[in-house]
């Protein structure tokens, strides 16, 4: 991929584009930074979009710095939240981040990646350090942010802890001497804080590249808390099925942001859809491409066959994962089998008639599973009770 495409494909904004483009074309090797807070145990495609962009820079020979926010993860980033994000215990964050580097290795060449944890430097800061950093910002800088202003206008609480988060992410850039930081559009304020703090610490201010956010399977922003994610840890069959469930209007977005299918082919796919072609055909190609990226070509072929035989022909699969859920209530059973991510999610699925037992729609939560019963969620997920 050439420099022009790297700076445009899936990109929302580049600051300072002229400077970054000049440095890239000069052959200078940059330190390119991305930080991810382990607020959930899985990396989903929404986050993989930025990881793919990191790989593009890595393929050009730049140094990738992948920061796992084991410290910032406990504090909580409020950039994309309309309510206060609760603090997480260090135990939960530690548990969540166990496989982050392994998951990132599905995309990055992890052996050539500088993987670091921001507790290494953030734990050492004292009030004097934080005072110095805070001096670089005004209160209005923080409260003028759209989501913070909206919360204040509606009388919702905004904690001082939340206002300090951008300082921490910004100091990450100082600590690793970043030349370029990547992030989603919701991270713009935090990314700019890195530029401000680098200037305060007499470093050259990093350039910024923001990526468009990708919607989840239900059309809302992809979020682990909403259960609408496609994760790098999903099985090949689950990944294929989830991709097939996305709204048709996301096909081109996913091809552009989540794959590296050449853009001329993406444009052809978009044209076929606009001219009346069946979106399902393009979605099948997208699903197969994504499964190939994360599970290999053989698995993508098998997943396609599984989807066609199971869902298009409405057959129940021969092999269904078994769980010790016989004798459990349907709410507990959907949780234990992974069909639901929480009790409220289970109740929502049942209320929306999205759960079946042995082919019959579940209409009450007062149902107990028997050995051999098969639970089905929509058209993709099956679990057998034992």
Image: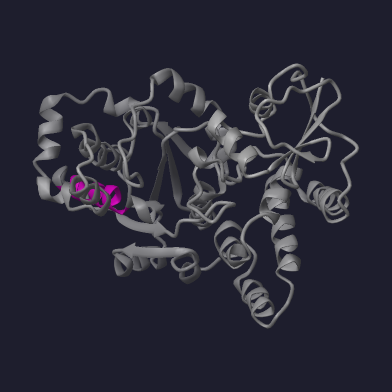
Q: Position of residue 348 (x, y in %)?
A: 58, 39
Rendered image quadrant of residue 364:
top right
Q: Position of residue 193 (x, y in %)?
A: 23, 48
Residue 125 relative to residue 227: left or right = left
Main structural element of the magenta stretch: helix, strand or loop?
Answer: helix
**What stretch of residues is rendered in magenta?**
188-199
Percent position of residue 78, x then y? 31, 41
Position in image of residue 122 (x %, y %): 27, 28
Question: Which residue is painted at 72% across and 50% down in the image?
Answer: 240
Is residue 253 within the magenta segment?
no
Quarter holding the C terminus is top right
Q: Name the image quarter holding residue 278.
A: bottom right
Total tally of numbered discs in the picture: 0
Instruction: Tell me what residue is drawn at x 14 percent, y 30 percent.
Output: 129
Which corner quadrant of the image does residue 111 belong to?
A: top right
Query: Which residue is painted at 29% across and 40% down in the image?
Result: 169
């Amino acid at each position: 991929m050439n420099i022009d495409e790297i700076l445009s494909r899936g990109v929302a904004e580049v600051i300072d584009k002229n400077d970054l483009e000049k440095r890239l074309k000069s052959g200078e090797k940059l330190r390119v930074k991305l930080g991810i807070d382990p607020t959930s145990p899985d990396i989903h495609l929404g986050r993989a979009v930025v990881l793919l962009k990191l790989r593009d820079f890595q393929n050009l020979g730049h140094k990738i710095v992948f920061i796992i926010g084991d410290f910032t993860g406990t504090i909580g980033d409020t950039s994309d939240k309309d309510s206060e994000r609760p603090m997480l215990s260090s135990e939960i964050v530690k548990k969540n981040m166990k496989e982050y580097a392994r998951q990132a290795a599905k995309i990055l060449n992890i052996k050539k990646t500088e993987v670091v944890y921001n507790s290494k430097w953030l734990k050492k800061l004292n009030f004097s350090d934080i005072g110095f950093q805070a001096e670089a910002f005004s209160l209005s800088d923080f409260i003028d942010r759209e989501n913070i202003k909206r919360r204040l206008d509606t009388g919702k609480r905004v904690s001082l802890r939340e206002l300090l988060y951008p300082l921490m992410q910004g100091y990450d850039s100082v600590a690793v001497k970043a030349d370029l930081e990547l992030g989603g559009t919701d991270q713009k304020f935090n990314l700019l804080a890195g530029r401000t703090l680098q200037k305060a610490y007499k470093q050259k201010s990093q350039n910024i590249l923001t990526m468009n956010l990708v919607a989840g399977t239900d059309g809302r922003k992809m979020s682990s808390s909403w259960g609408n994610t496609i994760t790098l840890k999903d099985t090949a069959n689950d990944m294929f099925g989830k991709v097939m469930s996305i709204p048709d209007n996301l096909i081109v977005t996913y091809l552009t942001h989540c794959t590296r299918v050449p853009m001329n082919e993406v444009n052809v796919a978009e044209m076929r859809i606009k001219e009346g072609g069946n979106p399902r055909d393009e979605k099948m190609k997208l699903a197969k491409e994504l499964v190939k990226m994360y599970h290999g070509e053989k698995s993508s072929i098998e997943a396609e066959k599984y989807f066609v035989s199971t869902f298009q022909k409405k057959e129940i699969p021969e092999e269904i994962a078994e769980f010790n859920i016989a004798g459990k209530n349907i709410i507990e059973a959907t949780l234990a089998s992974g069909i639901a991510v929480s009790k409220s999610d289970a109740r929502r699925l049942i209320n929306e008639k999205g759960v079946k037992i042995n082919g019959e729609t579940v209409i009450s939560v007062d149902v107990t599973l028997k050995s051999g019963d098969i639970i089905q969620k929509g058209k993709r997920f099956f679990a057998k009770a034992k």
